[in-house]
Image: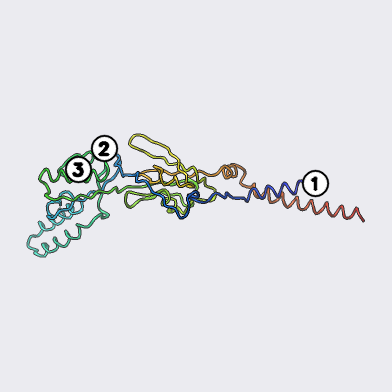
């Protein structure tokens, strides 16, 4: 028993300091091989999405009512001109400001919110069903209606999701909500933005919580295999939540007394002291 105590204490210390060795991503792929990434993701519009929509034409004045930023600028400048029509310089000012306002997204653009019925309220065209459509489909639909109804002869429509965001929590170095510029974000890009996974993360079973209309689904994704590239969760969707689970060993450590490492250190010190005393006693007895 007197020989087992130091060994037991040392084993406990070694167990407390060990770390997981499974840290490689896509470890089963040959490094000189080519892997095709399936294009399985299209940005589908959902209720609650905030859309930026911009209409262009060879006749800029025809699209002013359909663009929030240029329409607002026109109203403000019209008010200014009506205050004092004798100021000829306002005509030049109008042209300058209108040219500046025809740039793309500005901080003043609020966008079009998709309501619970899946519709947006678009100038002149009224209610447009958007939920369930891809951005490309919505752009084509608006452009076709503007042309068919004789509102714009040559419309070119651009649409983007303004509130595209993904939340990453759990065993990452910087858990956060990521605001995406664009409509695509891969699981690896999201992890990189969060500073990578911690050493205590499970890499072969990440959980992705996804809302699809009124439904909510939970899927798993394995970062250690090349099958990751074929997963429907490789491309993250708007409002996805990624949860990185800790290893079982880390769970046990988190559940126990936070002073356990200190107790182990004390136990090792005491065991070492006992062993030294026993050696001293044996030495004295042999004299």
Camera-nearest label, 3 or 2: 3
Write the residue at 33% across / 47% down: 164
- State the image quarter where residue 134 is shown: top left
As rendered, which of 33 and 235 lies closer to the eye? 33
How many neighbours does mark 3 have within 10 angstroms: few (below 14), some (14-19), or many (20 or more)? some
Answer with mark 1 or mark 2, whichever residue precedes in sequence: 1
Helix, strand or loop at disc 2? loop
Counting residues from the start of the chain, the first of labels 3 and 1 encountered is 1
Tell me if label 3 and label 1 are in contact, CB under 8 Å: no
Residue bearing mark 1 = 2
Quadrant (top left/top right/bottom left/bottom right) for the N terminus: top right
| Residue contact between numbered discs 1 and 2, judged by CB atoms under 8 Å | no
Residue furthest out toward the right: 287
Q: Which residue appears at 50% of the width and 50% of the height?
A: 27
Q: Nearer the viewer, residue 177 or 206?
A: 206
Question: Which residue position holds label 2?
Answer: 118
Residue closest to the far left: 86
Q: How far apart are marks 1 and 2 (CA)?
A: 74 Å
Mark 3 highlights which residue? 141
Residue at figure coordinates x 20%, y 49% from the top left: 157
Question: Is residue 102 positioned above or below 203 on the image?
Answer: below
- Measuring from the top left, give residue 215's x and y in whole percent: 36, 34
> How far apart are the two marked residues, 3 and 1, measured between alpha carbons?
83 Å
The C terminus - image quarter: bottom right
Q: Tell which tag, 3 or 1, sits nearer the viewer.
A: 3
């Amino acid at each position: 028993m007197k020989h087992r105590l130091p060994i037991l204490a040392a084993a406990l210390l070694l167990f407390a300091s060990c770390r997981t060795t499974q840290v490689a991503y896509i470890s089963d792929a040959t490094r000189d091989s080519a892997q095709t990434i399936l294009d399985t993701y299209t940005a589908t519009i959902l209720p609650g999405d905030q859309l930026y929509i911009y209409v262009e034409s060879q006749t800029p004045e025809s699209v002013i009512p359909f663009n929030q930023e240029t329409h607002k600028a026109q109203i403000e400048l019209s008010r200014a001109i009506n205050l004092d029509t004798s100021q000829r310089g306002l005509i030049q000012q109008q042209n300058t400001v209108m040219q500046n306002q025809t740039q793309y997204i500005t901080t003043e653009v609020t966008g079009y919110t998709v309501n619970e019925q899946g519709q947006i309220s678009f100038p002149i065209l009224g209610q447009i069903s958007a939920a369930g459509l891809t951005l490309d489909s919505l752009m084509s639909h608006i452009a076709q209606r503007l042309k068919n109804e004789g509102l714009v002869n040559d419309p070119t429509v651009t649409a983007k999701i303004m509130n595209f965001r993904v939340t990453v929590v759990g065993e990452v170095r910087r858990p956060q909500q990521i605001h995406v510029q664009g409509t695509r974000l891969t699981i690896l890009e999201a992890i990189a933005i969060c500073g990578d996974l911690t050493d205590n993360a499970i890499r072969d079973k990440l959980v992705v919580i996804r809302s699809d209309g009124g439904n909510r689904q939970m899927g798993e994704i394995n970062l250690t295999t090349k099958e990751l590239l074929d997963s429907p969760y490789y491309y993250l969707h708007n409002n996805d939540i990624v949860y990185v689970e800790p290893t079982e060993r880390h769970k046990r450590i988190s559940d126990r007394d936070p002073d356990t490492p200190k107790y182990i250190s004390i136990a090792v010190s005491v065991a070492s002291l006992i062993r030294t005393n026993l050696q001293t006693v044996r030495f004295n007895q042999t004299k």
